[in-house]
Amino acid sequence: MKIGALDMGINYKQCSKCGSKNSLRIIDGMPGPELFQEADAGKVKLGGCCIIEGAPEYFCNDCKYEWNREQAIDGAYSKIKTVKASVGGYFGGYYNVEIDLVNLKTIWSHRGGGEAESTVHKTIRKSTVVKFIEQIKMADLLNWKAKYIEPGVCDGAQWSVEIIIDRSAIKKHGDNKFPDNWEIFCKAVARSTSKIFE
C-alpha cells in the first residue's frame, strides 16, 4: 500500500465530489479592487456580498461543485475503510485492534505483559460505525502529525495508527508522546470493540 494524500492532514481544497485539486477559494463580502483583479485572473471566486455561516468556501473548476470546510472534513472521514491501531510497552504488553468499517467487524488482541495472548473477534452495527467516525473526527485523527517522539526515553509506551482509505494507507506513530486528543481516540476504540485500549 502507498501512503495516501491525507498523511499531512485534510486537504480542504480538494473537491469533496470529484476529488479534483483544481479549486478556488470563495471570498464572501463586499470585494475591493484587488479582489476583483484576483477574480478576473482566476485566482479566487467571488461569493455573495453577505457573509453567511456555513456558506461554501471552495469552488471546483472541474465539476463546479462548491463546499465548505465542514463538508471537506465529513467527506474525508467518510472515505475511511479500516482503522488499525496498537499501543503498549514491554512491561504491560501490547493492545492491537482492527476496526473494519465496511464489513462491520473488529479484531482486538492483547499479547505480552506476562499474560496469555488473547484475541476477540466481534461484529458491530452500522450505528457503531457512525458513532466511531464521529468520535475520531472529534479526536481530529486525520490531522495528527505523522510522528510524536519524546527523545531520551528508553522504556515506556509506543503506539501506531494506520488508516486505510481505498487503496492508500495513512500511518502515524509515537514513542512516549501522544497527540492532544489521544484519550478521545482510545475511548472510541474501546467503545467500538467493547475491550480495553490504553
Image: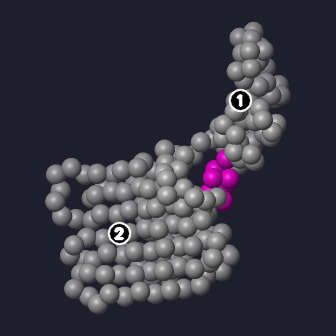
Q: Residue at x 18, y 64 (%)?
A: 155
Q: Position of residue 120 (x, y in %)?
A: 46, 87
Q: Which residue is mark 2?
A: 87
Q: Which residue is depicted at the point 61% across and 59% down?
A: 166
The crowding category of the residue bearing disc 1, from other C-alpha atoms within 10 Å (few below 14, some 14 to 19, many at least 20), is many
Q: Residue at x 75, y 47 (%)?
A: 17
* Magenta-drawn segment: 72-78
Q: Residue furthest bottom?
A: 116
Residue 24 is labelled as 1
Residue toward you, 74 or 32: 74
Instruction: Determine which quarter of the picture holds residue 42.
Output: top right
Q: Is residue 132 left or right of residue 40?
A: left
Based on the picture, tell me whether residue 74 belongs to the magenta stretch: yes
Q: Circle 2: is it few (<14), some (14-19), or many (20+) Cα within 10 Å?
A: many
Chain-order first, disc 2 or disc 1: 1
- As displayed, is residue 45 above or below residue 180? above
Q: Is residue 148 above or below residue 63?
A: below
